[in-house]
Image (tube, rainbow, N blue to C red):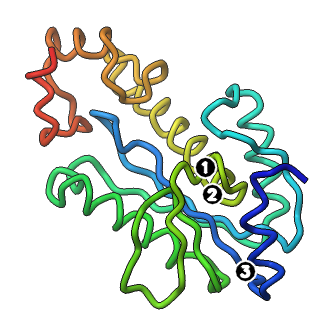
Amino acid sequence: MTSNFRIERLLWADGYRFIAGVDEVGRGAIAGPIVSAAVILPEYYFIDIKDSKMLTPLNRERLFKKILSECICWSIFFLSSKLIDKMGLSSANIYTLEGALKRLKVKPQMVLTDYYDLKGKSCPFLALIKGDCRSATVAAASIVAKVIRDRVMEEYSGLYPQYQFDRNKGYGTREHLHAIQSSGLSPIHRISFKINNQV
């Protein structure tokens, strides 16, 4: 079993059966939603995920299908760019993580996050620095959120082709910023990021 299940193994040994990993994707984008996912994997389950950010799109899709077919349960939560602007980025992040956890069909006994503090919630949690590298459960949630958000941005690319959302996924690449300069902002851009100052 790979080392990124060490935390889960310790928790399983202490009697925690339902351990949820939760993670978000899209925090640093200048367009599109934040998407959070929560996943509970079976006890002593094995999946070889060392760093979800290093996966190729093909491997991510393969693991996405495996996770969804074999996990105990999973959930997803979206927050639009307009609500991100209204709430502020930090509050929006926490809100989406909590939203994904609330949608799980099985109540977790422990939650693992990628650094985010969920104090005040009814369920115990561990906020792990580089959680998607240290915990396979968090990495699984990261993969689910990433694949689903990428699909959403590819759909937006059909509506707003000039921004090439299928390529940049809403992040502030040079080409994306130039497209904003020439075409203005789309309805899914985040005004609170003061995008025009980046061009």
Q: Estimate how packed mark 3 is, as few (under 14), some (14 to 19) or many (20 or more) residues with alpha carbons within 10 Å.
A: many
Q: Is residue 115 above or below residue 57?
A: below
Identify the amino acid type marked 3: Phe
Q: What residue is disc 1 on?
A: 132
Residue 93 quadrant: bottom left
Cα gap from disc 3 to disc 2, whole angstroms: 13 Å
Identify the amino acid type marked 2: Val
Residue 142 shown left or right of residue 193 in the figure: right
| Residue at screen point 34% across, 35% down | 29
Q: Are marks 3 and 2 in contact (CB under 8 Å)?
A: no
Disc 2 or 1, which lies upstream in sequence? Answer: 1
Cα gap from disc 3 to disc 1, whole angstroms: 18 Å
Q: How many marks?
A: 3
Q: What residue is disc 2 on?
A: 138
Q: Is residue 122 above or below residue 21?
A: below
Which quarter of the rendered picture does the C terminus lie within? Answer: top left
| Residue at screen point 63% across, 57% down | 138
| Residue at screen point 72% across, 65% down | 7
Local SS, label 1: helix
Residue 8 percent location from the top left of the image: 75, 68
| Residue at screen point 50% across, 79% down | 102
Q: Estimate how packed mark 1 is, as few (under 14), some (14 to 19) or many (20 or more) residues with alpha carbons within 10 Å.
A: many
Residue 76 quadrant: bottom right
Q: What residue is disc 3 on?
A: 18
Q: Are marks 2 and 1 in contact (CB under 8 Å)?
A: yes
Residue 63 percent location from the top left of the image: 78, 43
Local SS, label 2: helix
Identify the amino acid type marked 1: Asp
Local SS, label 3: loop
Disc 3 or 2, which lies upstream in sequence? Answer: 3
